[in-house]
Image (tube, rainbow, N blue to C red):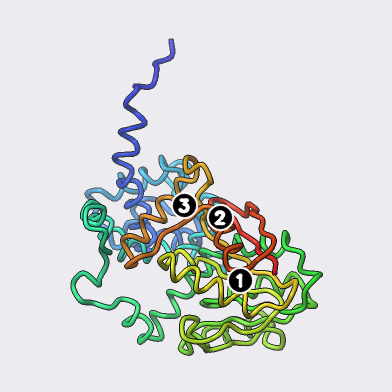
Amino acid sequence: MAISRPASAKIMELGMGFWGSKALLSAIELGLFTELAKGPLEEEVLRTRLGLHQRSARDFFDALVALGMLKRTGKRYANTSETARFLDRMKPSYVGGILEMANARLYRFWGSLTEGLRTGKLQNEAKTGEDFFGTLYADPQRLEGFLKAMTGLSIGPAQVIARKFPWKQHRTFVDVGCAQGGVAVEIAQAHKHLTGAGMDLPVVGPVFEAYAKAKGLSQRLRFHPGDFFKEPLPRTDVLIMGHILHDWNLDEKLMLLRKAYDALPPRGALIVHEALIDDGRKKNAFGLLMSLNMLIETPGGFDFTGADCCRWMKEVGFTRTKVERLVGPDSMVVGMK
C-alpha cells in the first residue's frame, strides 16, 4: 500500500530549501564539479582533493546525489550531464559565476529580507557604507569574473533571441549594459550580416574586446564606452536591454525607454529581456523572487510583467509591442518604433 505524502511536505521542503541551496553553492565554491570533470572519484580521494574533514564529507557528497547534482556508481562519484556542462569552470558553458556571487554575497543578505520588507530599504553592503560595485569595478580581476557571470546568466536567452527576432530586417544592433559581451556574440555568430556594439562603462571595454576577439568577431563587434544615464544611447537599428530595467525605479525605467526610443530610426526595435513576471503574477516564482532581490540590492528597483513593459513602451512612443517567451523564467518584450 502506497504511503501518502504528508500535506505539510511541500511547506517543509520550501521552508528548508536553503539547506539544498547552500549545499550546491558550497560545492561550487569548493570546485567539486570542476574536479569531477577530470573523471569519477571515490569518496576518500575526492574528500582529500577538496580538503574536506572526514566527518561529513560522505553525507555532503550523498546529499548532492540525492539532490540530483551528482551520480554515484558503486563507490565512485561523478558529475551528471547537467553539472558536467554547466558547473565545470573550465568550460565556456559554465554558469556557476552567478552562483559564486550568490554564495559570497546574496546568501547572507537574503537573511535580512524581513528587515527589507519592513523598511523598504536595500540590504546589501550599502547598509554599512560599503560600495560593492565601486570596489568591484576598481578591481580588474574581480570585475572580469563578475562580467563572465553575467554571460552565464544571459547566454541561454541570447541564443533564443538570436533565433526568434527577425534579424534579417536589420543591419546593426547595440547591447546596452553589455557586460562581457555574451548576448552580442551569440547574435553576431548567428547572423553574419549584422554588425553590433556593446555599451557599458569604459572599464568594461578590455573585457568585451577580449571576448569578441576570442570568438573571432572583432571586425563586427565594437565597444561603445558610456554611461547610459548620462549620455544618449548609440543610434542603431536595434537596441537590447537585458537585465537592465529591473535595477531602477519607475521614473528611471521610463527615462531609459525614452532614450531608447530617441536613438532608434523609424521601424527600429527595442528588445527588453528579463525574468518577466507573468501577467497574472501567480506562476513565475523566479521573476517574483528576482524582484525581491532588487529590494535587497537596489534603492528602488523592481521586476515587472510583460504587460507593464508594453504599457511603458507605448507611453514613451513605441507603436507596437509584443511579449515572447525565451528560456526558463526569461521572456522578452519587443517594442517597434
Residue at 30% from the left image edge and 58% from the top image edge: 107
Which of 277/3 is in front?
277
Question: Is residue 185 placed above or below 281 in the rendered structure?
Answer: below
Which of 273/10 is in front?
273
Is residue 45 something that shows in the picture? Answer: no
For disc 3, the marked residue is 287
Question: Is residue 120 placed above or below 168 in the rendered structure?
Answer: above
Q: Earlier in the sequence, mark 1 or mark 3?
A: 1
Left or right of residue 176: residue 252: left
Q: Secondary structure at mark 3?
A: helix
Query: Which of pointers 1 and 2 indicates the residue nearer the eye?
Result: 1
Question: Is residue 278 placed above or below 216 in the rendered structure?
Answer: above
Query: CA gap, disc 1 to disc 2?
Result: 14 Å
Q: Position of residue 88 (x, y in %)?
A: 49, 63
| Crowd class of label 1 (few under 14; some 14 to 19; many from 20; radius 10 Å) | many
For disc 2, the marked residue is 330
Q: Position of residue 332 (x, y in %)?
A: 61, 58
For disc 1, the marked residue is 240
Give the amino acid type for the residue marked by disc 2 in the picture.
Asp
Query: CA gap, disc 2 to disc 3?
Result: 8 Å
Q: Secondary structure at mark 1?
A: strand
| Crowd class of label 2 (few under 14; some 14 to 19; many from 20; radius 10 Å) | many
Q: Position of residue 73 (x, y in %)?
A: 48, 42
Give the amino acid type for the residue marked by disc 3 in the picture.
Gly
Residue at 56% from the left image edge and 55% from the top image edge: 330
Left or right of residue 42: residue 120: left
In the rendered image, the quadrant that contains the C terminus is bottom right
Q: Position of residue 203 (x, y in %)?
A: 46, 88
